[in-house]
Amino acid sequence: MIKIRFVLIGKVKDAYLKEGYAEYLKRLSKYASVRLDYIDEEKLPGSPSEGEIRKALDSEAERVLSGLKNQDTLYLCDLRGKELDSEEFASSLKKQIDGGVSSLVFVVGSSYGLSDLLRKKAKERYCFSKLTFTHPMTLLIVLEQVYRAFKINAGETYQK
């Protein structure tokens, strides 16, 4: 069974988001072994400089990268990534899995985004919307789209 790990850099305060995460992780467990990990966001001053932000993002990236195993394939949720529709995203995941990928790791960055250290290591970078969402909300969207992709690839219908 394929393994999928979702990593959120930052904290989630809203109960409705946590409930949504739990629901989609439960739904996905039919298709994969799934888990959700949190990595603390670096503390920054009120008006951080570009250098302070870059250093914080690099520190977050190093913590993400240190948790990866050799078989893990890294996917980033990145505003600079590819924009796909749901069928294209499902096809992309299917191609990876059919090609032998056995462990997917989806990373949602902190409120300042992602480090180039992660971008260099990522197999794919996906942009799930050009709209701005909080990173906890982005994770819920990613969970839903990964679930939708598995439903599509299994030839199953999905309530719209």
Image (tube, grey):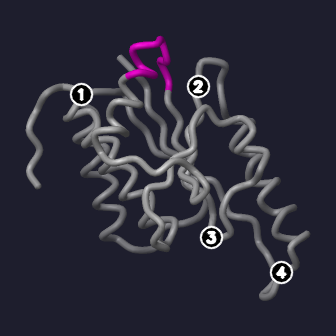
- Mark 3 highlights which residue? 111
Callouts 4 and 2 close, C-beta under 8 Å: no
| Residue depicted at x 20% and y 35% | 151
Please give the residue where the numbered disc 4 appears in the rendered image. 48
Relative to 107, is 151 on the left or the right? left
Which image quadrant for residue 79? bottom right
Mark 3–mark 4 Cα distance, whole angstroms, equals 13 Å
Q: Residues within 10 Å of mark 2 (few under 14, many from 20)?
A: some
Mark 2 → mark 3, Cα distance in angstroms: 24 Å
Location of mark 1 (residue): 153
At label 4, which amino acid type do we have?
Pro
Inspect the image, locate mark 2, and give the three-letter code of the amino acid beneath it.
Asp
Callout 3: few (<14), some (14-19), or many (20+) C-alpha neighbours within 10 Å? some
From the image, which quarter does the N terminus lie in? Answer: top left
Q: Earlier in the sequence, mark 1 or mark 3?
A: 3
Cα distance, mark 2 to mark 1?
A: 21 Å
User: Which-is-in-front pick, marks 2 and 1?
Assistant: 1
Which residues are the magenta region? 95-103
Q: Which residue is mark 2?
A: 72
Horizontal side of 156 relative to 116 (left or right) equals: left
- x and y, in percent, of residue 148 in the image: 25, 42
Nearer to us in this view, 81 or 57: 81
Q: Mark 4 vs mark 1: which is more N-terminal?
A: 4
Label 1 sits on a secondary structure element that is: helix
